Image (spheres, coloured by chain):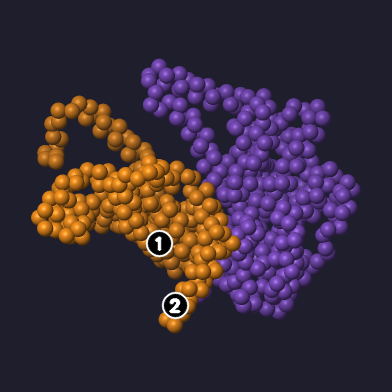
Chain colours: A orange, B purple
Amino acid sequence: MMNGFVAKSPMPGFRLGMGITVTMLSIVVLLPIGALLLHGVNFGLSNTWQVVNTERVWNALFLSFRLAFFAALFNLITGTLLAWVLARYEFPGRRIVDAIVDLPFALPTAVAGIALTALYAPNGLFGQFAKNWLAPIGNFLFSPFGVEFSGRIAYTQWGILIALIFVGLPFVVRTVQPVIGEIEREVEEASATLGATRFYTIRRVILPMLMPAALTGFALSLARAVGEYGSVIFIAGNIPNKTEIAPLLIVIRLEEFNYDAAGAIGIAMLLISFSMLLVINLIQIWSRRRIGHV
Amino acid sequence: MNRPHPKLGRFTDFSADMTAGSRAMGQDCRSDDLGRAGAGARPLRRILAAALTAFALVATPQIAAAQDRLLNVSYDPTRELYRAINDAFVEKWVADGNARPAIETSHGGSGAQARAVVDGLKAQVVTLALGADIDQIAERGLLPEDWQTRLPHNSSPYTSTIVFLVREGNPKGLKDWGDLVNDGVEVITPNPKTSGGARWNYLAAWAWAEKNGQDPKEFLAKLFGNVPVLDTGARGSTTTFAQRGIGDVLLAWENEAYLALEELGEDQFEIVVPSVSILTEPPVTIVDKNIENDSQRALAQAYLDYLYSPEAQALIFKHFYRGWDTSKADPGDVARFPELDLVTIADFGGWKKAQAEHFGDGGTFDQIYTAK
């Protein structure tokens, strides 16, 4: 905790470290964002609003953020589970599974997009399965309720969701895994000796300790999914109002040489992302307070 | 991908994939490779790495200066054509007693390619899908406004038209534009905002509707209602249709349709020629502001003139484009093209007018997706 201006520290290198931090942040992060905002200021607030406040832009923004949220939520649950398995159990091939988790980081997103599209297209391996098995079963079960399944995954919102889950998964696993490693087994044993059931131990002891890290992973996964372009354009149908993500709309505006409109949509995305991350941070602070410092 | 030049290796390999984005990615990778040499090394090694990097940066243009280079920024479906033409031109240029030039070609959606040139990609020659995209470059002062009068046939050494590619046996019985708006027909076309070919598709459909007493705007709204996937470029749409098995009909350049037949098997697809289509003119020109010296200008001029020569025209016919000069072409290549009622861009009042009216912000294409 820093009370006062700069607390004295026994560690050397504060000035140098701080200098590099500020320079790097400015060049790598603040400069591009500043340029974007400056562009928006020059374009004018009301003009920016006019560009954003159209049905097509709202649909694209809603699609991007909604699917990114669901993908991050899915990753939060499955990623935490995966991290638990990797950190807690010894099994043959554990290291291989551990390495596979990082693949979405390493693979160029365009390659991922094309591979996923080939798999989930109606003539692909999973696509055929979905069309021939899932859709008839789904329709048999749910058609009385007026729900219809086309059995198509690629070129629909399902395809986008799968691509976003793919690119976001490692974030949750990699943030949660070390925290699980830190939790000592004695904590669980103590909980058990005090009469807690297994489920109670997970709910009241383990999960609260994982919460801050899991939320960080969730936020990273969400942020990544919101801006994801490379893999999604291959698997999305890119139909306006239906499967057109906001980043694609920005690219389309750029192709029209309409830099102002592209900047305006970019600013809208930036603001929404910023407020979402703010909310997540607030939840983190709240959860830390609630369970004490981990 | 182009074959990298033996001396210059990967530095000459500017050929990009389907989008401008992936081209940027390719360039990033190169600068990355240089940058990584300096990261994390000890001081002496770091200095050495920096010196080597500087040498590499300085040396590359010097090697290049000894040799004339040409960057031809082209659109999506010309990959195979320019691969053949570049080889043939280099042979001829060398046979005429000149030094061997390095000719590179980059491909992508026509609009994206034009934007890359506007944003500073040093292309000496552009060969795009439609005049409007070159107009955009001219508007930024990189070449004169009257560029299209500089070479014969509206600066279009090859033309094509828009046809339908359908699945074997034409199961949905699609014969003409009117059949495409039937219920249950899925039409594949790229997005006219990002693809030049798609703009020709759009205008061809518009022309048919006008000639057949339909409201063209309503007709196109119905047509695009049947489009399940809008790719950003023509090649992407071909992949979606042919390899992913989506859709009943692909609206394609005639040359792209024949290429798909050749590459993917004649037993899978059929070409259907509609009653009305449009004469597509993909023009070529020199980007004057990007010419560095006289010898480069001479090379660029010779390159474009070569496109009109009987030898290049024969290659053009061979690659399924409609050329002008049949003297050296294989008669079989020429006989392939059926006669049909072709409107031209002049019927739409030229690209300047058509671009603003149909594909500009709030144009008829935008109205399709805002009217609902």
* Residue occupying the far front of the picture: A92
Residue bearing mark 2: A141
Q: Quadrant of residue B242?
A: bottom right
Spot occupied by residue B64 in the image (x, y as percentages of width and height): 64, 27
| Quadrant, the N terminus of chain B | top right
Label 2 residue SS: helix
Mark 2–mark 1 Cα distance, whole angstroms, equals: 25 Å
Label 1 residue SS: helix
Mark 2 or 1: in front is 2
* Residue occupying the far left of the picture: A194
Q: Is residue B127 left or right of residue B94?
A: left
Q: Is residue A159 left or right of residue B342?
A: left
Residue bearing mark 1: A67
Spot occupied by residue A154 in the image (x, y as percentages of width and height): 52, 62
Taking depth in this image into account, of B113 and A43 the one nearest to the observer is B113
Task: Tell me which residue sits at (11%, 58%) in the image.
Answer: A195
Regarding residue A241, the answer to whether it shows in the image is yes
Task: Tell me which residue sits at (54%, 68%) in the image.
Answer: A131
Spot occupied by residue B299 in the image (x, y as percentages of width and height): 73, 34
Mark 2 or mark 1: which comes first in sequence? 1
Regarding residue A48, the answer to whether it shows in the image is no
**Category of crowding for the residue at label 1, using alpha-carbon neighbours closer than 10 angstroms: few (below 14), some (14–19), many (at least 20):** many
What chain is tagged by disc 2? A
